[in-house]
Amino acid sequence: MFGHKTKNTIDSLIGLSTRIEGNLYFKGGLRIDGHVKGNVIAESGETSMLVISEQAKVEGEVRVAHLVVNGEIVGPVYSSELLELQPKARITGDVYYKALEMHGGALVAGKLTHDQVGEQILKLAPPKLAASNA
């Protein structure tokens, strides 16, 4: 509507019994029910959606256009469009967003920063390498 395309389909699923160690890059829609230890980053320049379910845990940086959280994220969060924090959402880390919808019961232990220009959010800081001795 009004020339704005939104894609709310889930293309990929990380199941409840799945554990991933390492960075995860995706485009389109992704739902995480399992455990990811590493950064979860959507390809920039495309509308992306990430769903973190109630049972899911992500330990690392999250960068995506549309983010729905009902599980746990430990690390910084960058949402260039809409961030939805559902009742059981738990985020430990700073959060950068363009639009925020927060339900009662959702917890954020970190700084909330609003940015009106969403595309700049995804480009704020390059992801850090996991094994850096410098």
Image (tube, rainbow, N blue to C red):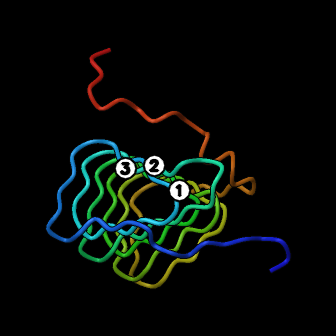
Q: Which is more toward the observer, 99 or 34?
A: 34
Front label number (3 vs 2): 2
Residue at 57%, 54% (x, y): give it: 96
Q: Is 41 positioned to the left or the right of 124 in the image?
A: left
Q: Which is more toward the observer, 96 or 112?
A: 96
* Residue hosting label 1: 64
Q: Position of residue 35 (x, y in %)?
A: 22, 60
Find residue 27 and name its label: none
Q: Is 119 positioned to the left or the right of 111 in the image?
A: right
* Residue hosting label 2: 41
- Does dot 3 land on a helix, a strand or a loop? loop
Residue at 36%, 48% (x, y): give it: 24
Residue 49 higher or lower than 103, as above or below: above
* Residue hosting label 3: 75
> N-terminal of the two: label 3 or label 2?
2
Which amino acid type is shown beneath numbered disc 3? Gly
Q: Position of residue 58 (x, y in %)?
A: 30, 57
